[in-house]
Image (spheres, helix red, strand yellow):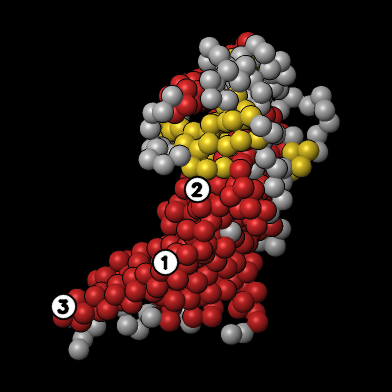
Amino acid sequence: MKRDSIPYVVLFTFVVSAVFVTLLALANEGTKPLVEANKAYTAQAAVLDALGIPYADKAEAQRLYAASVTAIEGTNPRAYRATLEGQDYIAVEQTGAGLWGAITIVLAADPAAGRIRGVQLVAQNETPGLGGRIEEAWFLNQFRGEAAADGIRIAVGAESKGTGDRDSDNSLVDGVTGASRTSSSFEVIVNEALKRVRAVAGGAQ
Amino acid sequence: MSQSKTMAILKDNLWTNNPIFIQILGICSTLAVTNNLRNTAIMTIGVALTTAFSSMTLSAMKELIPRKVRMIVQVLVISFYVIIIDILLRAYLPDVSKQLGPYVGLIITNCIIMGRAEAFAPANPPLLSFWDGLTSGFGYMAVLMAIAFVRELLGFGTLFGLRVMPEGFVPWTIMIMAPSAFFLVALVMWWAKNMQAKGQAKPAAPSAAQPAKA
């Protein structure tokens, strides 16, 4: 068959596509359990981080998660219940719009949402180096123990020092310098999550 | 594969025909990923490996590929390797995969890969094509790492995430944003072309240098 004849071209394209796609499908199937396990671990780790439970490795994270956290049946997006040092906490997953794409966080608080236990970032697509800095520890750690009875506020512009607000009673945290839009979106997402904590505590799904 | 030829390819791809400052390929990713060294390193390794393996595969298949559909086949092979990299990262290096996010998929949009697949692989044996792809990736890596070094140092005051600048250092926010990469790429091009022009001027006869003035 000639290399440029139509039947050869069609046959060749078909065979080549079939071979490569089959290889990809095999690779995808072969690594599926691993990818699923990684996903499950990421979700558990985010809840533990939000609750402020330290863990050293994957095995310890799984053990601690099993010991202290229970997923609440039927909640969507997922919500969790945990008891630490005799105090009940509720953790919720919350997704909202960022500047470029969705931002997903896990927020843990007491059932009345009077004080935030912690916030952990699960996924974001903000500008690397600007809005992307919301995943940095100095930013997220500001939420630890922050009073939130009337929601929280994230300082932007001149009000923000950009280095982190250490007062945990003023319901105010510093935004990221150069990323006011992302910071404001984050504020909305955190406040929505706080509302949901109260709703879940009241029995909502 | 003769040694002189492999060395010639290496020199070509790293310097005389560098993909960034001579061929001006792969500029989009130069702007996007170079604000920190870690992402740049991973991205450029990904591009180098993809270019190497896709060039090798296409070179091995070159007798079988009909001219009419060669670009379709090139894209198929390149995307195959990019998806394989993505799958492997997700399974074995989930942290890196999460950090890179959309960047892995963007490897495929890098013009260097298709450039080598189209310009080198169809006329050369597989191993030499692999070497050509790899060194093209290195040429790309060298320039991007240099740019990322400056951008991360001035933009964050860190290198590979480790603080190196003194406490009082005020980060240059512009360095984190894409425009600074434009300035830096232009500076690299300016410097490299100047160096190359000097290198050519020395051995050449005066008459050969004359037309450049026009």
> Does residue A154 lie above or below A32 as drawn?
above
Give the residue type that dot 2 points to: Gly
Circles 1 and 3 on the same subunit = yes
State which quarter of the image contains the N terminus of chain A: bottom left
Relative vertical location of residue A120 with respect to residue B6 in this rendering, above or below: above
Residue found at the very far left of the displayed protein: A6
Mark 1 or mark 3, earlier in chain: 3
| Secondary structure type for disc 2 | loop
Q: Considering the image in quadrants, where does the C terminus of chain A appear? A: top left
Q: Can I make out residue A21 in this image?
A: yes
Residue tagged 1: A28
Residue extending furthest toward the front:
A86
Q: Nearer the viewer, mark 1 or mark 3?
A: 1
Label 3, on which residue?
Answer: A6
Residue B211 in view here: no
Q: Residue at x 27, y 78 (%)?
A: A15
Label 1 packing within 10 angstroms: few (<14), some (14-19), many (20+): some
